[in-house]
């Protein structure tokens, strides 16, 4: 027991340090083959012997990771076919096999049984847009939201002055079963910096709470209580950011405060040989940092497909995962942009929270890069637009449909968690734990709500 507690302490001080310890070959082989029972048994045997603290910590986490892998693949073949039949009209015999053979669906064999990723059917539609014609229930509401957002985007492209808005929103976290112990809960809260000028708490589920600093790298409101429900309602002011491209060339002066965003941050920002060669290929002979970043943005928005991915805690190197597979969600695409920019000598950093507008609120990630000043880049939103003008807007500029809560990935929460985080990279929907265990995402329901969105300047 003493050794496990020490391992957990090491994990809390630097989770990513644990991931730098390579798994023993036998464990890695078993895990990659989907033989999770064998992998678990090997880990237990290894942990019964004296080990370096970092390796012991990695193996302790790997036991938890094996459990999470199973949760990420909830469907067998019959259940997967039912998901497809419920979603698509006229499903033909052999189509599932064809989609698997073409790589549009990638099942995994876990302990000898074929299993399908939780979001496999959504990813199929992302990768083969023609299938949307066969949807039994087209998402008309999403299309309406996009038209609403595009109207303001087009106004900005025509030269409308950037506006400032006051937004009121609410996040709720409800445990799926009553807790037997006191619960510790961290909910994201607007960070006052960059495009956000002010934020205040309007209402909360508990009188006693802890609000982290206005510029905390992952800002949260923290609660404790033997309760099932936690919520925070807040209001913040945010501005649209529309910046003219810098004049001329040679915008390469980097102040000390920005130079830290040129370095590697293992395990997800690493200048592997592949990354260095790809960055050099994309940038070519360009010397100006603004244009380097623009070339990287153009390449990513034209070459990466949007798909949902495994939870980030299951990915060894998020940026390389996206660059090698040429697909991924908003966070994968952002880390690919940040990694390529840094490898090319352009400071770049993370920003995340929510994409929020009337009719739609969802977690989202985007980036910032430095060329004389900090500018924005939203790879996945930019790539979603067929219009070149709209796609180009999201290099250097940003709309106000945001709730920024995080400025760094993998930053510590305040107070620190005692157990493994559900998402060690980001905090967009909240974290919860008891004295004895972490409460994983399937242990609670989350609700993100927009209550009002008003132009104030």
Image (spheres, rainbow, N blue to C red):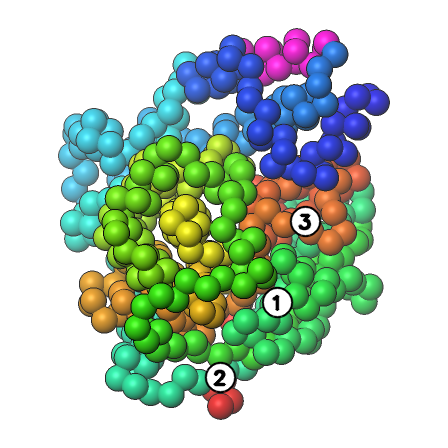
CA–CA distance in space, label 1 to label 2: 16 Å
Is residue 41 within the magenta segment? yes
Residue 163 image position (x, y, % from top left): 44, 85
Q: Mark 3 points at which residue?
A: 412
User: Which residue is found at the position 32% from the left and 76% from the top?
Assistant: 247
Label 1 vs 2, first from the N-terminus:
2
- The x and y percentages for residue 45 are 66, 9
Residue 401 in view in this figure: no
Q: Which of 220 and 174 is in front in this view?
A: 220
Residue 186 is situated, as x and y percent measured from the top left of the image, at: 69, 54
Quick one: label 1, few (<14), some, or many (20+) residues within 10 Å?
Answer: many
Please provide the residue range marked out in magenta: 37-49
Q: Is mark 1 on a helix, strand or loop?
A: loop
- Name the residue at 68% across, 25% down: 54
Mark 3 touches mark 1? (CB < 8 Å): no
Q: In this view, does 450 lie to the left or right of 107?
A: right
Is residue 20 among what the camera can see?
yes
Residue at figure coordinates x 79%, y 54% from the top left: 224
Name the residue that disc number 2 marks: 164
Answer with the quarter of the image where residue 442 lies: top right
Numbered-mark total: 3
Q: Distance between the residues labelled 3 and 1?
A: 15 Å
Residue under label 1: 191
Q: In which quarter of the image is residue 205?
A: bottom right
Quadrant in the picture for the N terminus: top right
């Amino acid at each position: 027991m003493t050794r496990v507690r020490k391992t957990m302490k090491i994990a809390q001080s630097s989770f990513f340090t644990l991931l730098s310890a390579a798994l023993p070959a036998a464990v890695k082989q078993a895990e990659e083959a989907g033989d999770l029972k064998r992998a678990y048994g090997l880990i237990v045997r290894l942990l019964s012997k004296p080990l370096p603290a970092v390796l012991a910590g990695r193996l302790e986490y790997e036991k938890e990771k094996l459990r999470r892998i199973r949760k990420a693949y909830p469907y067998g073949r019959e259940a997967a076919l039912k998901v497809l039949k419920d979603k698509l009209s006229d499903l033909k015999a052999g189509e599932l096999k064809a989609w698997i053979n073409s790589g549009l669906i990638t099942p995994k064999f876990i302990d000898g049984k074929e299993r399908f990723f939780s979001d496999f059917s959504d990813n199929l539609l992302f990768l083969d847009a023609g299938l949307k014609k066969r949807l039994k229930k087209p998402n008309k509401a999403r299309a309406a939201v996009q038209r609403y957002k595009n109207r303001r985007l087009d106004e900005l492209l025509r030269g409308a002055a950037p506006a400032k808005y006051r937004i009121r929103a609410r996040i709720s976290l409800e445990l799926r079963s009553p807790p037997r112990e006191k619960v510790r809960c961290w909910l994201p809260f607007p960070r006052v910096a960059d495009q956000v000028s002010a934020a205040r708490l309007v209402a909360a589920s508990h009188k006693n709470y802890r609000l982290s600093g206005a510029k905390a790298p992952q800002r949260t409101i923290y609660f404790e209580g033997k309760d099932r429900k936690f919520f925070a309602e807040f209001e913040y002011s945010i501005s649209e950011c529309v910046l003219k491209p810098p004049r001329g060339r040679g915008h390469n002066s980097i102040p000390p405060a920005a130079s830290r965003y040129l370095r590697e941050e293992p395990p997800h920002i690493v200048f592997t040989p592949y990354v260095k060669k790809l960055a050099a290929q994309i940038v070519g002979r360009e010397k100006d940092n603004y244009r380097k970043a623009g070339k990287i943005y153009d390449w990513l928005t034209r070459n990466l497909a949007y798909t949902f991915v495994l939870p980030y805690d299951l990915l060894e190197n998020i940026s390389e995962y996206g660059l090698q597979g040429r697909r991924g969600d908003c966070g994968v695409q952002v880390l690919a942009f940040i990694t390529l920019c840094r490898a090319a000598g352009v400071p770049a950093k993370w920003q995340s929270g929510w994409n929020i507008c009337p009719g739609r609120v969802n977690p989202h990630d985007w980036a910032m890069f430095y060329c004389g000043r900090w500018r924005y880049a939203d790879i996945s939103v930019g790539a979603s637009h067929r219009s070149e003008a709209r796609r180009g807007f999201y290099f250097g500029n940003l709309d106000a449909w945001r709730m920024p809560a995080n400025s760094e990935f993998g930053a510590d929460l305040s107070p620190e968690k005692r157990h493994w985080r559900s998402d060690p990279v980001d905090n967009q929907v909240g974290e919860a734990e008891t004295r004895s265990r972490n409460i994983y995402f399937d242990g609670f329901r989350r609700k993100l709500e927009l209550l009002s969105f008003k132009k104030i300047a």
